[in-house]
Amino acid sequence: MVEALGKAGLYFDELNKIRVLEPDVAQQTVELRDDCKEFVDQISEFQKKSDKFIEIVDQLGEKVDKEKMKGLGSRNLLKSMSKQKEANQQQLVALITEKRMQLERLQKQYESLLRVEADQNEFIEQFLLQK
């Protein structure tokens, strides 16, 4: 009778219930279902970890961009400070040149005044000697 039922596509499982599938096929179906559930769970866990990783990488990228902007700002500030230093140095060189020229002019003026004073003293002495 079991063979007749088997030919008709009906089978008994381990609990003696009538099944349409062969017990081996039914067992493989259950195992496949369990494997699929485990696979889906693993994929879900992978998705969660991937999302968390992407979030962390995005946050890190934002921090890197902020630091990059700070670095660019610092570099630009350093360049402008260097240019300002160079401009100040040029101004000081120009001021030194101007002061040297003024010193030379004042020295010549002083020497000229000393000659005039000497000439006047000589004139006074000659005038007093003539009297």
Image (cartoon, grey):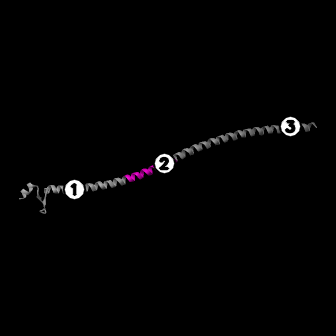
Q: Is residue 121 left or right of residue 9?
A: right
The region drawn magenta spans: 54-73
Magenta residue check for 101: no
**Disc 3, SS:** helix
Residue identifier under label 1:
33
Q: Is residue 119 left or right of residue 91?
A: right
* Residue at 44% from the left image edge and 51% from the top image edge: 62
Outermost front residue: 8
* Residue at 69% from the left image edge and 40% from the top image edge: 98
Outermost left residue: 1
Residue identifier under label 3:
122
* Residue at 45% from the left image edge and 49% from the top image edge: 65
The kind of residue tagged 2 is Met
- Distance from disc 3 to disc 2, alpha carbons, whole Å, reads 78 Å
The kind of residue tagged 1 is Arg
Are discs 3 and 2 less than 8 Å apart at CB? no
Neighbours of disc 3 within 10 Å: few (<14), some (14-19), many (20+): few
